[in-house]
Image (cartoon, helix red, strand yellow):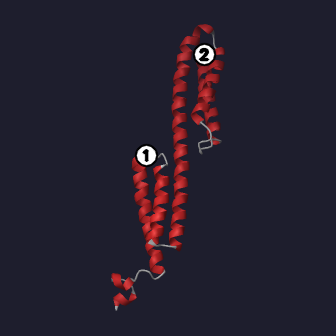
Amino acid sequence: AMQQLTKFQSDMSDQVTQRSRTFDPTGKSNFAKDVADLTTKQKQQFLESIPTQLQPEYSARADQVIAAVHQSAVKFQLDAADTYTRQGLTDAYTSAQQALDQDGSAANLDAQRTRLYAQIEASGLSTAEKQALTRQYNIGMESVSYKSEVRNGKVQLDALGVGSSAQA
C-alpha cells in the first residue's frame, strides 16, 4: 500500500506538471479546478488499488498529498496569471513610451498616464506592486516626454542652465 501511495504521489506530480505546461494564464481556464477534478479521480483509482481494510488510513494520507497538490496548483495559477498581467502592463508601458516619444506634450503625458494607471489599477496585483509600477512607469514616461519636448524644441536647454551655450 505504501508503494501505491508513493506511486500515487509521483503520478499526481507528473500529471500536474504536464498540465501546467499547457495552462492558459489569460483566465480562460481554471487550473486549480482542473487539478481538483484530476485528484478526485486519481484518489479513487488509488484507493481501489489497495486492500479494503487499509483504505481509511491511506485515504487520509492521500488527502494530505492532495492538499499539497491543491495548494501548489492555486499558487501556480496565481503566479502564472500575475506574470501574464505584468507582461501586459509592460507592453502597455512600452506603447505609452512610444506615443510620448512622438508627442511629449503635457496633454499626451496625462492621457498616457490615465490609460496606463487604469490598467495597473485593474490588474489584480497587490497594492504594493501597483504602487511600485505606477512610480516606475511615471518616471519613465516623464523622462521620455521631456526628451521628446527637448528634441522638438519646446524646452530650451539654455533656460535650464545646461547645453552648449550655457558652458560658454
- Side of 88 relative to 161 (left or right): right
Residue type of the residue flagged with mark 1: Ser
46 vs 154, nearest the viewer:
154
Camera-side mark, 1 or 2: 1
- Residue at x-position 56% and y-position 16%: 59
Relative to 17, say whether 160 is above or below.
Answer: below
- Give neighbour class at mark 2: few <14, some 14-19, many 20+ (Cα, 10 Å): some
> Upstream in the sequence, badge 1 or badge 2?
2
Residue type of the residue flagged with mark 2: Ala
Residue 55 placement: quadrant: top right
Residue 19 placement: quadrant: top right
Number of numbered callouts drawn: 2
Q: Which mark is residue 126?
A: 1
x%, y% of residue 57? 54, 13
x%, y% of residue 66? 55, 25
Mark 1 and mark 2: Cα distance apart in space: 44 Å
Q: Which residue is mark 2?
A: 1
Quadrant (top left, top right, bottom left, bottom right) of the C terminus: bottom left
Relative to 90, say whether 41 is above or below.
Answer: above
- Side of 112 relative to 161 (left or right): right
Relative to 153, say whether 101 is above or below.
Answer: above
65 vs 137, nearest the viewer:
137
Badge 2 marks a residue whose secondary structure is loop
Question: Residue at the front extreme?
Answer: 107
Badge 1 marks a residue whose secondary structure is loop
- Give neighbour class at mark 1: few <14, some 14-19, many 20+ (Cα, 10 Å): few
x%, y% of residue 103? 51, 73
Quadrant (top left, top right, bottom left, bottom right) of the N terminus: top right
- Residue at x-position 62% and y-position 8%: 52
